[in-house]
Image: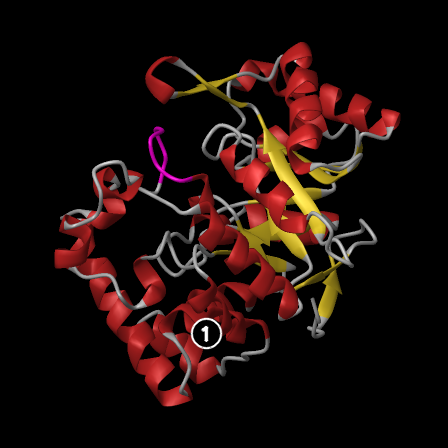
């Protein structure tokens, strides 16, 4: 596989030089579970990963919870035998419960079991970045982060971080070990991270990779009321508040602004949405969810797309 080069930036103070966009592997966990994305073909997933690697992407973000192991298994198959293995970022604490619903555990023994299962599925000896997926149950975050730190001391993981944590929760755990990375949601539609968590991460030198910069596909420019209605019943987005009224009309107006900027710049709406998320100075990289190889090229344009102040203002309706 011949790989091209994309510009990189250091993820916080980890020493890992990552491309501005990474391959997001949530959707390739498929359907049939609480937060699934409907049917997914594993061979299409592998082709998408290979295309992203060919274009220079050097990290993949997955989680044990995505399809309860399916996403990690597919990633493991995709990277087997590649000449230059990408960085592998994954997460723990979401377990399979009755009816394929998510249950949460931050207990030490549970996390250690998850880590052992993850390295087996990925086919590697060491996880580059291991993160707590959700701070739930809140009273167990210290125990959970202590378990991650143990795994780091033992060499099973190289770096440790958290996802979806608040500033207060990060302050509670950083006496255990440095919080090297943070993974919050951040997009034109979900901007909560701007007020406190992103400025905090920047001040403290915590590496940031944001997820859902296209707001789970809503900002990709192809989502309509009709398409949302036609989503498979096992696609979690069908019941998400962003995809339903009264919020949907407001969000579709944002999508139209994204389309207008994209048309002017002759790129895809998704690339514009991702580039907007990357403009925040606290953000080192953005996770771009991909399911098919034909999606990869147009979305990876965001890695080199620089929006002007005027474009950014237009996107937020300014």
Residue with the mark numbered 1: 298
Most foreground residue, 136 or 130: 130
Q: Is residue 188 magenta?
A: no
Percent of width and height locating residue 150: 81, 21
Q: Is residue 40 above or below residue 258?
A: above
With 65 as the anchor, is 269 left or right in this view?
left
Percent of width and height locating residue 97: 42, 15
Mark yes or no: residue 232 visible.
yes
Residue shown at the point (28%, 43%) measured from the top left = 237
Quarter in which the C terminus is drawn: bottom left
Mark yes or no: residue 287 visible.
no
Q: Which residues are magenta?
A: 30-36
Most foreground residue, 77 or 275: 77
Q: Is residue 34 magenta?
A: yes
Report the predominant secondary structure element of the magenta stretch. Answer: loop
Most foreground residue, 74 or 251: 74
Residue shown at the point (60%, 15%) measured from the top left = 140
Q: Quadrant of residue 250?
A: bottom left
Residue shown at the point (18%, 61%) measured from the top left = 224
Q: Quadrant of residue 315?
A: bottom left
With 132 as the anchor, is 12 left or right in this view?
right
Q: Is residue 181 above or below residue 265?
A: above
Residue shown at the point (37%, 54%) measured from the top left = 215
């Amino acid at each position: 596989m011949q790989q091209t080069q994309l510009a990189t930036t250091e993820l916080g103070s980890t020493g890992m030089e990552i491309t501005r966009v990474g391959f997001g592997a949530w959707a390739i966990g498929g359907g049939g579970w609480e937060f699934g994305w409907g049917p997914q073909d594993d061979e299409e997933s592998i082709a998408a990963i290979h295309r992203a690697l060919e274009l220079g992407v050097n990290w993949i973000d997955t989680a044990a919870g995505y399809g309860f192991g399916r996403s990690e298994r597919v990633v493991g198959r995709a990277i087997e035998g590649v000449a230059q293995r990408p960085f592998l970022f994954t997460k723990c604490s979401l377990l399979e419960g009755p009816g394929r619903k998510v249950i949460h555990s931050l207990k030490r023994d549970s996390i250690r079991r998850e880590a052992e299962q993850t390295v087996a599925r990925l086919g590697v000896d060491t996880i580059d970045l291991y993160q707590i997926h959700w701070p739930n149950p809140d009273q167990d975050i210290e125990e959970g982060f202590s378990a991650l730190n143990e795994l780091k001391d033992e060499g099973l993981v190289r770096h440790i971080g958290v996802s979806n944590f608040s500033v207060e929760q990060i302050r509670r755990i950083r006496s255990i070990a440095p919080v090297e990375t943070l993974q919050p949601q951040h997009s034109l539609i979900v901007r909560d991270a701007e007020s406190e968590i992103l400025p905090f991460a920047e001040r403290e030198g915590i590496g940031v990779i944001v997820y859902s910069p296209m707001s789970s596909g809503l900002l990709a420019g192809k989502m309509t009321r009709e398409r949302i209605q036609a989503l498979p019943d096992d696609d979690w987005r069908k019941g998400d508040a962003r995809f339903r009224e009264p919020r949907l009309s407001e969000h579709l107006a944002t999508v139209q602004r994204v389309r207008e900027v994209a048309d002017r710049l002759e790129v895809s709406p998704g690339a514009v949405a991702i580039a907007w998320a990357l403009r925040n100075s606290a953000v080192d990289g953005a996770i771009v969810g991909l399911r098919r190889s034909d999606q990869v090229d147009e979305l990876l344009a965001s890695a080199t797309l620089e929006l002007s102040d005027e474009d950014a203002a237009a996107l937020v309706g300014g």
